[in-house]
Image: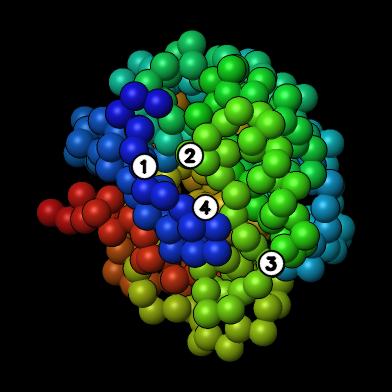
């Protein structure tokens, strides 16, 4: 993993550790210190919704209601993905790439090819996948690392009964605890707001927070969120996709990141104004991570 070695350890039942981990990748990347011609700091993470399928319908997820989020048998094309990787390579981007968003990424039939394209154009990038683990095997885990994956994060939702099988899977795969990371996601406890959100108002978790929240949000200051069809969304909490800020089929990543649409969003969220969609109904704090990334924009 080169410069991305020695990242913070993630305690399986401490969601805050994951935030520190994401920040560490961000700040270790060369993109943290780069800017576009207009002075806009580079994003340091790019998240992909590489497929629009999931094998689960969890109660805390919009997919529990197929009328809100149906299971769409779609995935990103290799042509579009290669175009995005070329865009990133041309500007000398380096940072974190995560396959997660609104789906179970192991359902993507092109996963190996996507990894190989990534490492061809961005050999210094850091690539991770977030999975529910249902489709994961020791052999698949080894194969993904061979193809270019740096880290597999497995989110366990069903309880303690899952721990031993996945620990055994990790050992059998020969991967280290830094390459095969297990996270407990079944008991909210005090960290409820860190694990789950109302998905920009899409589901009701009984959170009584007064909306819209009156605080900043750091997401659009350091992360680009790309859907399977090339649309760039405001963030991965916008499950009903109320606001897209560009389309990478016809725009470059530079054009989208420095666009007037993104400028509007950053101006609002940088001044604690969330009274626009999808942010007006979102209960995500948005400031628990990315503070140093956000501060790059302060002039």
Residue highlighted by disc 3: 186
Mark 4 or mark 3, which is nearer to you?
A: 3
Q: Secondary structure at mark 3?
A: loop
- The answer to whether marks 4 and 3 mark residues whose Cβ atoms lie closer than 8 Å is no
- Asked if the residues shown at circle 2 and circle 1 are in contact, with their CB atoms under 8 angstroms apart, the answer is yes
- Identify the secondary structure beneath mark 1: loop
Q: Distance of mark 4 from mark 2, alpha carbons?
A: 26 Å
* 225 relative to 230 in the view: left or right: left
Which x, y percent locates residue 68? 80, 61
CA distance separating discs 1 and 4: 24 Å
Binning the other alpha carbons within 10 Å of mark 3 as few (below 14), some (14 to 19) or many (20 upward) gives: some
Dots 4, 2 in contact, CB < 8 A: no
Image location (x, y in percent) of residue 235: 52, 52
Q: From this view, report whether residue 171 is shown above or below residue 266.
A: above
| Residue ID for mark 2 | 178
Q: In the structure shown, which secondary structural element does the residue marked by tag 2 occupy?
A: loop
Identified at 72% across, 51% down, the residue is: 164
- Label 2 vs 1, first from the N-terminus: 1
Residue 288 shown left or right of residue 168 in the figure: left
Q: Residues within 10 Å of mark 1 (few under 14, many from 20)?
A: some
Residue to which mark 1 is pinned? 7
- Residue in the picture at 30% in, 34% down: 29
User: Picture quarter containing residue 229?
Assistant: top right
In terms of sequence position, does the residue under pointer 2 or pointer 3 come before the other?
2
């Amino acid at each position: 993993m080169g410069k991305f070695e020695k990242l913070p350890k993630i305690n399986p039942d401490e969601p805050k550790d994951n935030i520190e981990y994401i920040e560490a990748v961000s700040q270790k990347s060369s993109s943290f210190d780069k800017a576009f011609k207009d002075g806009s700091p580079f994003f340091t993470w790019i998240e992909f919704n590489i497929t629009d399928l999931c094998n689960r319908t969890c109660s805390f997820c919009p997919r529990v209601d197929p009328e809100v989020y149906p299971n769409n048998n779609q995935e990103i094309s290799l042509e579009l993905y290669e175009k995005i990787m070329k865009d990133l390579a041309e500007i000398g981007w380096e940072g974190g790439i995560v396959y997660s968003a609104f789906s179970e990424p192991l359902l993507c039939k092109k996963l190996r090819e996507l990894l190989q394209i990534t490492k061809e154009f961005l050999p210094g990038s850091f690539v991770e996948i977030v999975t529910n683990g249902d489709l994961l095997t020791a052999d698949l885990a080894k194969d993904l690392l061979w193809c270019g994956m740096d880290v597999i994060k497995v989110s366990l939702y069903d309880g303690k009964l899952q721990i031993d099988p996945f620990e055994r899977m990790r050992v059998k795969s020969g991967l280290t605890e830094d390459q095969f990371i297990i996270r407990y996601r079944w008991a909210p406890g005090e960290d409820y707001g860190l694990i789950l959100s109302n998905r920009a108002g899409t589901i009701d978790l009984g959170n009584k927070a007064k909306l819209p929240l009156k605080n900043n949000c750091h997401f659009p200051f350091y992360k680009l969120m790309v859907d399977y069809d090339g649309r760039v969304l405001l963030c991965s909490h916008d499950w009903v996709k109320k606001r897209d800020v560009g389309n990478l089929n016809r725009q470059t990543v530079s054009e989208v990141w420095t666009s007037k649409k993104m400028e509007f969003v950053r101006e609002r969220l940088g001044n604690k104004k969330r009274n626009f969609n999808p942010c007006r109904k979102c209960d995500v704090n948005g400031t628990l991570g990315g503070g140093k990334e956000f501060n790059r924009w302060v002039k």
